[in-house]
Amino acid sequence: MRSNISLVLLLFFLVSSCRKGEHITTDTNAKLTIATPELLFDTIFTSIGSITKRLSIVNNNKDAVKVSEITLTGGSSSAFSLNINGEDTFNKNDLVINGQDSINLFVKVTINPNTESLPFLVQDSIILNTNGNRQVVKLLAYAQNAVFINGQTIATNTTWTKSLPYIINGVFTVKSGSSLIIQPGAKVYFHKDASLNVEGNLLVNGTVTDPVLFCSDRLEKLYNEEPGQWKGIFLKRTGNGMVKNAIIKNASVGITSDSLSSTAEPKLILSNSIIKNMQVAAYIGYHSELLAFNNVMYNCGNYLIYAVGGGNYNLKQNTFAGYNLNFPRKTASLSFSDYLSAGAYNKLRLDLTNNIIWGSLTNELDIQKKTTAAIQLNLWNNIIRSANSSYSINGNILNIDPSFINKEMENFEVSADSPARKKGADLSSDPYFTGYLNKDIKANIRISPSTLGSYEK
């Protein structure tokens, strides 16, 4: 008999413990704890959905509560969509949340295009009713209309302005004989793995105050500095480019250039621009030609510049900062070679003047001669991090830190006591002096002897 009583008591305690937190309270003080009173989505483009955000709803009471209503106010016509514990719905009734338990709401937003040219605000709310308590979560999203380009090809001269951003999906091609002209302040966004292929001419006319932007179409903070989101800009065999005052970021390769120019114009003039956060390299050239003045390149996976198969490279007053926030790099920031393959090697002409070539590795400049092709080198007045003592001529400064103001904050101007100050060679007779080299990346007048790198001090 005594054993039967003990068994009954044991079963009673087991059942009671299993039901702990499952008793539904109607106490009006039993409120839910909501992680945030509002969800804000960064600016997104119309027709392109946002990332999914999670909203945690917690019952910190010892007893269960019944949420009589969870409602997306805008219902089925809302720009926002709601998923409650795995179910896509805009309304859920009588949902029980056990004591000391929680549920997750997942929210996305997709906004239809309209006639607005400036970003506009889209709003809605989620309402939760529990024991007569009404709790509200505000939903806010900034939206931007855009010009959507899906795998197009242009064969006539085309101008892009800053009135609306452009979003490229797939491969956008500028055919031979035509030009794409991009005016100051224009923004060009690329969907995942999209690219710009140039068989004709690319003319990017940014200004100091109105640069042209090339980046991914994901504007959420999560993606702001994420490399490899789009493929890059490709100058094909017949393509030429002039890129001035641009910001190019978050691609696999910023600019890839194939072959020397097929016209009297240089293959690519790149000036006063920033190229950063590339998965592989800022620039890759295959027996090609690059004239680069007043640029800043940094945070790229393997290289800042990778030029193989020979070619012509004229690089003056640039800041090459081989610091990698996202990559364990093992290769020199600047790598040049006469060799591409057993059947493809050519003369290499390289002019490096008044640059800062610095970074986290012992050797940040690698010039390779692998074939019988001639190499013509002009290295004047650069700061170079290198173990190659032969570079210590012609005013070059080896292995003395240029003293960037704050590389962690991406400020590659040099400090007041930098060895780069007033060490530049006189470029006043350079054919590109008036158009490019007489001012720095911020349009400050250069005073000879100039400060090395992109920023005059």
Image: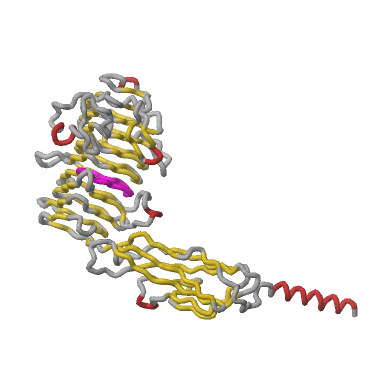
Number of numbered discs: 0
Does 250 appear in magenta? yes
Residue lying at 51% horizontally and 77% vertically, measured from the top left: 129
Q: Is residue 147 above or below residue 284?
A: below
Q: Residue 295: name its quadrant.
A: top left
Residue at figure coordinates x 45%, y 78% from the top left = 91
Tell whether 133 sits left or right of 403: right
Direction from residue 203 to residue 355 in the image, left or right:
right
Residue 17 makes an appearance in the image: yes
In the rendered image, residue 1, in percent from the top left (x then y), is placed at 90, 80
Quadrant placement of the C terminus: top left
* Majority secondary structure in the magenta region: strand
Q: Which of 155 and 186 lies nearest the eye of the viewer?
A: 186
> What is the quadrant of residue 398 in the picture?
top left
Task: Report which quarter residue 432 is drawn in.
Answer: top left
In the rendered image, residue 273, in percent from the top left (x then y), is placed at 25, 42
Residue 345 visible to the viewer: no
**Which residue sits at x=69%, y=75%?**
19
Image: magenta residue range: 244-256
- State the image coordinates of residue 44 (x, y, percent, origin top left): 33, 61
Q: Report x, y in % for residue 230.
A: 31, 53
Q: What color scheme is it?
A: secondary structure
Q: Is residue 152 magenta?
A: no
Relative to the observer, which residue lies in front, 234 or 117? 117
